[in-house]
Each structure stands twice: as structure tokens, then as C-alpha cells.
Image (cartoon, helix red, strand yellow):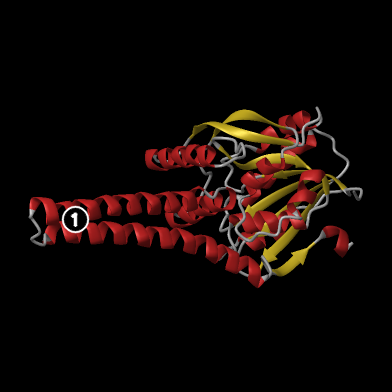
Amino acid sequence: MAQAKYSLSVIIPVYNEEDNVVPLYERLAAALSALELPLVELVFVNDGSTDHTAERIQKLPQTETLHVNFIELSRNFGHQVAVTAGLDNCDGRYVAIIDADLQDPPELIPEMLSKIKEGHDVVYARRKVRKGESWLKKATAKMFYRILSSITSIDIPLDTGDFRVVTKRVVDVLKQMPEREKFLRGQIAWMGFSQTYIEYERDQRLSGDTGYTWRKMLRFALDGITSFSNFPLKVATISGFVMSFVSFLLMLYALYSRFVLKVYEPGWTSLMLSVLFIGGIQLVSIGIIGEYIGRISNNVKQRPLYLIKEKTNQDTEA
């Protein structure tokens, strides 16, 4: 394993966070200064922002012990890909991942680092309270994590996001995982290693609107389920067997009605119900199989996961 240049790298994916960049930088600088680390890098990954986020980042002050490195992607590739781009381009002995909306407090990073130094490879933050979020979002998130935990063979922590600190060893293993449908918290849980957590109360966004629309959250949930579970395929298979059995019973009943009860007038209602129900099961099963085939197709194409439009590194400039 190559020697890391920085004591700590902080990966910060940003998308239209122009009003949050400076407050985040100030709180990070204050929180990390108490640690007296020899050299820290903040890796901002601009995920195709359409506001003045990039300009705000490039104006952040550099110090001898705190370097601000900037990666601008060619377009919006999504949160998980932006984090992956930061992980691919950081060089820290320890790596922290935090969003720019300040819902996750930077002041927790020193505590997470102290637990890492006790011998753990991963320290993640578990939410006790989620402020500023609707009851519907809280309910759907809670339901998703518990469904995912029940259908996967790995222990994915409940009520956690990507806010965590990991060692360089974890980052090196993540770089060996080439799948395009990234679900980082699942990938990190899959590794095993020594993992622990701290609990905290999640704040509401400091400014702006979340980039996670309902459509993106649904896609993220599908990525998590299909990346770490074959359960939907098993459901489709079991449904096929169940419907075959039901159809067989209906055939026996039809023969019994025809030859024993002598009642064999065609029933339009029962016929339509049977056709529609079986057809619906078939379409759902085909759709589930299609989701998996689509993911196979995306990985076979071997296109780059992301494209970097601009990269500013203080060490390279020096």
C-alpha cells in the first residue's frame, strides 16, 4: 500500500450549493484545526452545478496545512458517482465523506477519527433525528432501509447515509469495484472489516433545495436493492410457480365442471380476471428481469463512470 500524502482527505460532492460552500469550509476548518493534523485536503467535486458553486469553491483560501482541491465533472453524474470521483482522486490516510448542505455536522469528524484510531476501518454516523424533512420522506426512508436489510445477505446499517470516515484500505478496495450502479454504503458494508458508529441529530439544510428528487431517490433505492439482492428475481420465479399451480387447479375445475357438473357455459368475467391477473404477473416479472439485464448492459459497455472537465490541485499548481 502506497504511503498517503495527506493525514485526512474530506470528500465533498456539491450540486448547486453556492450558499453553503463558504459556511461548510469555515466549519470544517474550525473543526479540523483542533486536531493539529500536519496536512489535510478538502476535495470538492462539482457534479454539474448550474449556479455559482464552482466560483465559490475556487475562491476558498488555501493554507499550509489545509489544501482545497477542486474537481469539476463534465455534467451531472449523480451523488454516488461524484463521491466515487472524489475517492479516486484523493490521497489521504483517512478519508471522510460529507455532503455540502450542512445537515451532517463537520464537528463530528474529530470524534469519528478518534474511533478510527482505536482500530476500526469504518466509522459511520447513524441518525437519531432527521430535522427539516417531511413525514413522508422519513417514513419511506425508514421503510427502504428495513426492507433492504431484510432481503440482503449483508448487514447494511440502518438509518445511515454516506457521512462517515474510512481508512485508506477501504478506499483502495472501493477502487477495485467497477460496477456503475454505485451504492457506496452497501459496498462498504459488504467489505466487512471493523466497523462502528456514532449517533447524532441530523440538522435541516442550511440553504437551498435538495438535489435528491423523488425520481432520483427511487432510482437510488432500485440501485441498492438490485446491487445487493436477487430477491426480486426470486419473487418473480416464485410468482411464476404459484400462478402455474393456480392455473392447473383452474384446469381441473374446468374439466370437473364440463364432465361432472355439466356446467360449461363460458364465463366472460372469470376468463378476463384470469387473463389480466396472469398477464400482470408476467409483465412485472419481465420488468424485474429487465432491470437486472439493463444493469448488465451498462457494465458491459465499459464506458467511463464519469468525465472530469477541470481539475485543480494545489500541489500540481505549486
Residue 282 is situated, as x and y percent measured from the top left of the image, at 36, 60
Q: Nearer the viewer, residue 293 or 61?
A: 293
Q: Nearer the viewer, residue 73 or 283?
A: 283
Tag 1 residue = 255
Q: Nearer the viewer, residue 129 or 187?
A: 187
- Residue 270 drawn above or below residue 136: below
- Residue 226 drawn above or below residue 74: above
Residue at far front of view: 259
User: Which residue appears at 19% of the width and 55% of the height?
Assistant: 255
- Residue 107 location, quadrant: top right
User: Which residue appears at 11% of the width and 59% of the height?
Assistant: 267
Is the residue marked by circle 1 packed among few (<14), some (14-19), or many (20+) residues within 10 Å?
some
User: Which residue appears at 44% of the width and 53% of the height?
Assistant: 237
Residue 206 is situated, as x and y percent measured from the top left of the image, at 53, 44
Please state the total of marks drawn on the protein image: 1
Q: Is residue 245 left or right of residue 172?
A: left
- For the C terminus, the image quarter is bottom right
Q: Helix or strand or loop: what does disc 1 sit on? A: helix
- Residue 157 drawn above or below residue 281: above
Please state which amino acid type lies under the numbered disc 1: Leu
User: Which residue appears at 23% of the width and 52% of the height?
Assistant: 252
Residue 258 is situated, as x and y percent measured from the top left of the image, at 13, 57
Q: Is residue 60 visible?
A: no
Q: Is residue 82 visible?
A: yes
Residue at far right of view: 3
Residue 73 is situated, as x and y percent measured from the top left of the image, at 66, 66
Q: Nearer the viewer, residue 26 or 77?
A: 77
- Residue 35 location, quadrant: top right
